[in-house]
Amino acid sequence: MPRTPPTTTTIDRAEELVAIFEELQSTGSGWLNIVPELPEGTEVPATPNSLAIFSRRGPVVPLATWTTTEPTELGLLHGTSQRARFALADTVAAIPDGWRVLADHPRKGLVVVPGAGLGHRVVARWLLDALTVLCLPPHTGRFVVARYPG
């Protein structure tokens, strides 16, 4: 059976992402991929391929993933060549106290579990801030959200 392609939308604000979180969570399955929107014509350096096994860099345009699993897990692939917790430290997107870091690798990315009882608004705001901080090329301040059914 062929997979259903994702539906995509572009958002400006965390509130829009919250609405998508809530809609998807009400179905009980699926996930989101979120990337910063780049201006038309922006040249993006190639992401290291599988032959670059010793590279310490992921994609220069970060990719965030949000799932409907409980507890919610957030994933971030990025190209800063360092652990995300260090790249995000002392920024608006520093990993909040009480959040669990499940993985943090320069090439494989960051996986965190938000603190218990936090609403979607806090998670959405942090996710968009983290994407903004980790994005190496210039971006528009908007985000492209791809929604995958379960």
Image: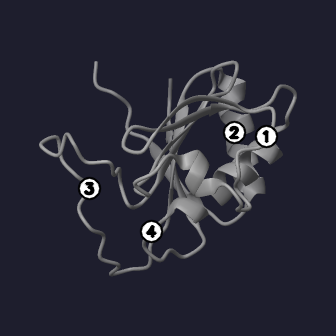
Farthest residue in the left direction?
Answer: 51
**Element type where label 4 sits in the image:** loop
**Element type where label 3 sits in the image:** loop
Neighbor class of circle 1 (other Cα within 10 Å; few <14, some 14-19, many 20+) is some
For disc 4, the marked residue is 136
- Look at the numbered discs 4 and 2 and tell me whether their residues touch, using CB distance below 8 Å: no
If you read the primary sequence from the N terminus, does the residue marked by circle 1 or circle 4 appear first? 1
- Look at the numbered discs 1 and 2 and tell me whether their residues touch, using CB distance below 8 Å: yes
Mark 1 → mark 2, Cα distance in angstroms: 7 Å
Pinpoint residue 22: horizontal percent, then vertical percent.
Answer: 74, 36
Q: Nearer the viewer, residue 25 or 125?
A: 125
Marking on residue 21: 2
If you read the primary sequence from the N terminus, does the residue marked by circle 3 or circle 1 appear first? 3
**Element type where label 1 sits in the image:** helix
For disc 3, the marked residue is 47
Q: Nearer the viewer, residue 125 or 22?
A: 125
